[in-house]
Amino acid sequence: MQSLPVVVLVDSNMVVKDRIRRILADQDVTIHEALSRSELLDILKENKDQIDLIVTDIEIDTDRSFDGLSLIKLVQSKSDTIPVMVLTSESKKEVITKYLRQGTADYILKPFEDNYLKEKILKHISIESLTEFTVLKFSLKNYLNHEIYKAQKGGYSFTLLKISFKLNSAFSGIESSNEFYKHSKAVYREIKALFWESDLYVQHGYHSHLGFFPFCNHENSKVIADKIIAQYQAYKLKDPEMQRYDITQNFSTYPTDGENATDLLKALENRAEEKQLKRKIQGEKLEIAGDIEINKGNQ
């Protein structure tokens, strides 16, 4: 089996593809290119279990009947472990929402900074990088600003949710990327089943889920949190392998935690960092207590 991460580029724009190659020039990455549905099918057939990421535009010019949505559906029909990153200049809210609902791992607007795109790609092809707090996309800020405008006019609250899914410390570092992706997708489907179609609940990479709940205040968010925990615990009982994983939830509520997208996203990030710090302190306390017990035993 090939050991290097594999990235597939699906774009007729040679300038963009050459730029991505330059961005990844200092990384040990294998890059394949496809210009049509048939070429992508060939690559999937030959490399399906080794592909770490597919990067595509919305329009694939050499095959007009095969657009970004068709590509995502095709990939999902062949494998539920391959993330698809959309790289496009299309910034319409309804298009972005459509792609997020379909399950795209990232939606990145052109023009983009090289370092930004590189960071995004590495988060998907490196299981270590994926454990870091995911940087929320600019397109999500646009979406939130639009929803804030509606909430202001309607005089209602809404809640933003971020769920992080990861191996617990007892199993950290011993899971293959394909196994992790498989379980991540399964957990996403389990939790998504809790919500209405009108709620926006999407997978953001393979370590995170994002949820948007209109007419949901701070107290209601606690009800959602309890429902998620109950669903996840029930799922863990059905599948013993799930004992290796943990989920954490963070919420921010408009207008309690902020009246603009930047403040709401910052509140999410701060709460994630606070929980991470608390876990670290608790771990250090347990380690110190263990050392004390060992020293007592040796006296």
Image (tube, rainbow, N blue to C red):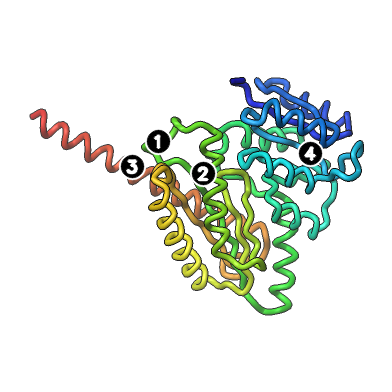
Q: CA distance from mark 3 to mark 4?
A: 42 Å
Most foreground residue, 284 or 161? 161
Left or right: 228 in relation to 84: left
| Kind of residue at disc 3 | Gly
Nearest to N terminus: mark 2 or mark 3: 2
Farthest residue, direction left: 299
Badge 3 element: helix
Residue 171 numbered mark, or none = 1
Give the labeled residue for mark 4: 56
Most foreground residue, 38 or 151? 38
Q: Do the CB atoms of the residues marked 3 and 4 lie less than 8 Å apart?
A: no
Q: CA distance from mark 2 to mark 3?
A: 26 Å
Give the labeled residue for mark 3: 283
Residue 183 numbered mark, or none = 2
Mark 2, other Cα within 10 Å: few <14 / some 14–19 / many ≥20: some
Q: CA distance from mark 3 to mark 1?
A: 15 Å
